[in-house]
Image: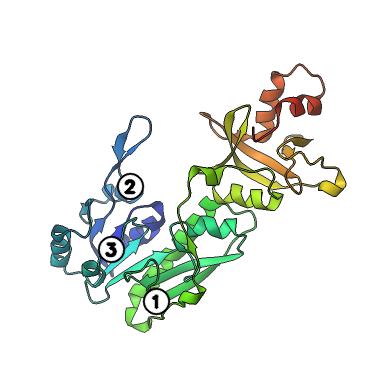
Amino acid sequence: MRVIFIGSSEFGIPALRELLLSQNHQVLAVITQPDKPKGRSGTPSPTPIGSFILEHTEKCPLYKPENINSPEMIKLLTALDPDILVTASYGAMIGKALRTLGKYKAVNLHPSLLPKLRGASPIQHAILCGENLTGTSLFRLNARLDAGDILLQRQLCICEKENYLSLHNRLAELSKDVLMDYLASPDSYKPQPQNDASASYCGKFDKADYNINWNETAEHILSQIRAFAPEPGAYTFLNGKQLKILEAEPGQEDKANGLRSIPGKLHKLYKNIGLGIETGSDELIIKMVQPAGKKPMPAWAYYLGLRVNSKSDNALESAETILVFGG
């Protein structure tokens, strides 16, 4: 199969790697987004797909068009005479001229069980919504967002303590397998229209979505922490300084068992494990944090650093005086 691969994020790397290694398929070209400024220096940096393909320049050319639907790009890609275009987390709409290019046209790998969770952030939303099941959909591109006919789907169970990174990586590997199965026998898969009445959508997040509201239930906050770990990280504030919460687990106490209804305040110390924090419902044990400008560290080590600056000899009293998240 003669393939043009179109993608930008880490999600597409396993599929692209498998295509490059395959003896049965030829990657004619890889298309990704242009380099963008990154970090404090603002130095232009390639996308993850761009960085990956630089290690395989002997395999195929790499293009970074400002507009993939420009006449120049359409002419260039048409001349390559592909059998199929494969897209995965590219970050821009593909026009009709490219969607219909090649015998098998353009297909997309999407990490949800479409029509559920169409849009930009299906992995995070699956965790936020407390889903137990997700998966990957391979579908044929059309003019509407993630609404094309489904060619192949595979399910994946979401583990109880799974965060965004681990689920992302497992879905990326599953997507690789789905794509290779389809390419091995594309005529065997009959396109199935999506049921628009069952569709749900998920957009991009902004910084406010990562801010923890300790008045929420412990279950909700735990899902928020998992959905955004390790990056960008759900965060809170302590004495006006931002603190990311990267890992937590359900606590052992609820309001009926002694919580004092002061959300965000330390309730109990768990030596060498973490900090029991009050929420709008039950206790939540914070296990891993990342102070601003520092590396991730165990929450217990973070607490010990706070205690050094306290004059109290009582550990719990000391921490309560200085450890109230959210303000």
Marks 2 and 1 sit apart, C-alpha to C-alpha, by 28 Å
- Residue type for callout 1: Leu
Q: Earlier in the sequence, mark 2 or mark 1?
A: 2
Task: Tell me the mark number nearer the camera, choosing from 1 and 3.
Answer: 3
Name the residue carrying label 2.
47
Residue 223 placement (x, y as % from top left): 62, 52
Name which residue lies at 70% across and 26% down. Answer: 304
| Left or right, 187 with reference to 210 | left
Marks 1 and 3 sit apart, C-alpha to C-alpha, by 18 Å
For the residue labelled by badge 2, is the local secondary structure a helix, a strand or a loop?
Answer: loop
Contact, CB < 8 Å: mark 2 with mark 1?
Answer: no
Residue 40 placement (x, y as % from top left): 37, 30
For the residue labelled by badge 1, is the local secondary structure a helix, a strand or a loop?
Answer: strand
| Left or right, 313 with reference to 99 | right
For the residue labelled by badge 3, is the local secondary structure a helix, a strand or a loop?
Answer: loop
How many other residues sit within 10 Å of disc 1, few (<14), some (14-19) or many (≥20)? Answer: many
Q: Earlier in the sequence, mark 1 or mark 3?
A: 3
Residue 22 visible? The answer is: no
How many other residues sit within 10 Å of disc 3, few (<14), some (14-19) or many (≥20)? Answer: some
Q: Quadrant of the N terminus?
A: bottom left
Q: Which mark is residue 151?
A: 1
Name the residue carrying label 3.
94
Residue 85 placement (x, y as % from top left): 27, 67
Residue 254 placement (x, y as % from top left): 81, 48
Name which residue lies at 53% across and 30% down. Answer: 292
Quadrant in the rendering for residue 175 = bottom left
Identify which residue, 158 or 58, lies in the foreground: 158
